[in-house]
């Protein structure tokens, strides 16, 4: 590495945090700037599943068909708020065009590259740094009420198998033995052994501890205003606490990235996809295995420290309203699957904005107007899963090292 090894990261979510981790291990002097609290954005309240087998993007022909059926239902798994905004309409049209089989194949290959080593990388970080974050590699169960949907999942599994991550069929008579919390009368399940879970808020708390131990400066409640620029390069980040100088920079601001088009001198096609969750204390009779309740697109994760249900996808812009209709849809979503549903009204409701691109791939690239500034954003619903490999890749690129993953599919040139 050259003597220029000061890195400034804008964004304290899981992508920025993992990048700071890998840069620190390479000997960089890292400063991380966060407008709120480290780790308390979309990284905080998701269901905490690391899913390397989830290589298919959201935009597939089947999801497009379902989405059109659900599009105006406020309590459906996917809700799109009606809009006359030309930019948002254009984004959804491009999303639909990326649902063609050729595009899905290209996207799947690129997603797999960031996902395949997720379990290995997490186990290295968590084990090496002795993190207490409810990590457990126990797989997950995809559960179906519909016999038709149960059989159709074979197509999804066939894609995962191409990358060595196939699931196992669980026929109805065996479901109760596999997961006693499930109701009888279900059509079957698929057990995916290539899934681990962690508690994301605890992981982010532990990651912050590790970064501070490594000497990373974390500046919270610090607003990013832009870059000082000289000869096509950034020399410092302008913030509400004054300038922060650096040699290389990373923008890892998740769903907020599109709003920074003036500061970055480029408009990135990232839309906020709002997800919800409810968290409660652990209690008897809850699933012991993470479950995907497929027809309702609801996920349930059980840790020693709590139980969480979450999911849904709401496109309503930068809307901070905690929509009770969407929260109630989570509650109703688990009713047809579980024997005993806890008093979810006593749980803690949360929402977060997933950073969605219209082609299902993140942006990991240098900005055209700044030769020493990278952006890493747009990881949609698998930010937790993609974070270690993304952080590793960005650290390699900033360090001028051969990349462990081909970065070309995540280039800005595709837009």
Image (tube, rainbow, N blue to C red):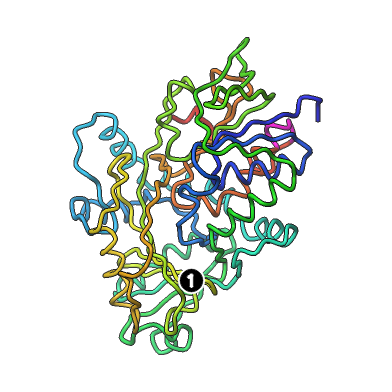
Range of magenta residues = 396-401
Q: Is residue 300 above or below residue 227?
A: below
Q: Position of residue 334 (x, y in %)?
A: 32, 72
- Does 362 appear above or below 373? below
Q: Is residue 300 left or right of residue 5?
A: left
- Residue 409 visible, this orientation: no
Residue 22: horizontal and vertical position, in percent? 70, 44
Q: Is residue 189 left or right of residue 194?
A: left
Return the residue nearer the eye: 148 or 27: 27
Q: Which of the 4 image quadrants contains residue 295?
A: bottom left
Q: Which quadrant of the figure contains the C terminus? A: top left
| Residue 266 appears left or right of 250 | left
Q: Is residue 378 magenta?
A: no
Within-10-Å neighbours for mark 1: few <14, some 14–19, many 20+: some
Judge whether 152 appears above or below 98 on screen: below
Where is residue 309? Give x, y as percent: 39, 66
């Amino acid at each position: 590495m050259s003597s220029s090894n000061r890195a400034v990261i804008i964004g304290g979510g899981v992508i920025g945090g993992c990048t700071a981790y890998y840069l620190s291990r390479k000997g960089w002097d890292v400063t991380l700037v966060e407008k709120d609290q480290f780790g308390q954005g979309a990284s905080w309240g998701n269901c905490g599943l690391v899913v390397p087998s989830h290589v298919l993007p959201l935009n597939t022909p089947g999801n497009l068909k379902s989405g059109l059926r659900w599009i105006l239902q406020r309590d459906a798994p996917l809700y799109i708020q009606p809009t006359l905004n030309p930019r948002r309409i254009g984004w959804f049209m491009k999303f639909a065009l990326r649902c063609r089989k050729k595009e899905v194949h290209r996207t799947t290959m690129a997603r797999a590259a960031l996902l395949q080593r997720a379990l290995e990388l997490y186990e290295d970080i968590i084990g090496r740094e002795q993190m207490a974050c409810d990590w457990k590699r126990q797989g997950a169960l995809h559960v179906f009420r519909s016999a038709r949907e149960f059989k159709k999942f074979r197509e999804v599994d066939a894609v995962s198998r191409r990358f060595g991550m196939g699931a196992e069929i669980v026929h109805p008579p065996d479901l109760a033995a596999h997961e006693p919390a499930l109701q009888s009368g279900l059509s079957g399940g698929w057990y995916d052994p290539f899934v681990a879970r962690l508690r994301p808020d605890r992981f982010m708390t532990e990651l912050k501890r590790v970064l501070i131990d490594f000497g990373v400066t974390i500046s919270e409640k610090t607003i990013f205003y832009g870059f000082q620029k000289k000869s096509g390069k950034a020399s410092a980040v302008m913030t509400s606490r004054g300038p922060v100088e650096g040699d290389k920079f990373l923008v890892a601001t998740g769903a907020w990235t599109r709003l920074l088009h003036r500061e970055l001198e480029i408009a990135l096609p990232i839309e906020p996809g709002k997800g919800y969750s409810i968290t409660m204390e652990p209690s008897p009779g809850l699933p012991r295995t993470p479950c995907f309740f497929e027809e309702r697109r609801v996920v349930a994760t059980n840790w020693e420290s709590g139980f969480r249900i979450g999911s849904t996808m709401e496109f309503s812009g930068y809307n901070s309203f905690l929509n009770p209709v969407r929260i109630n849809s989570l509650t109703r979503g688990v009713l047809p699957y579980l024997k005993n549903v806890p008093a979810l009204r006593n749980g803690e409701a949360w929402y977060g904005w997933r950073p969605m691109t219209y082609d299902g791939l993140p942006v990991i690239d240098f900005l055209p107007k700044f030769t020493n500034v990278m952006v890493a954003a747009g990881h949609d619903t698998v930010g937790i899963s993609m974070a270690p490999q993304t952080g590793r890749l960005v650290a390699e690129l900033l360090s001028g090292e051969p990349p462990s993953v081909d970065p070309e599919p995540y280039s800005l040139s595709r837009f």
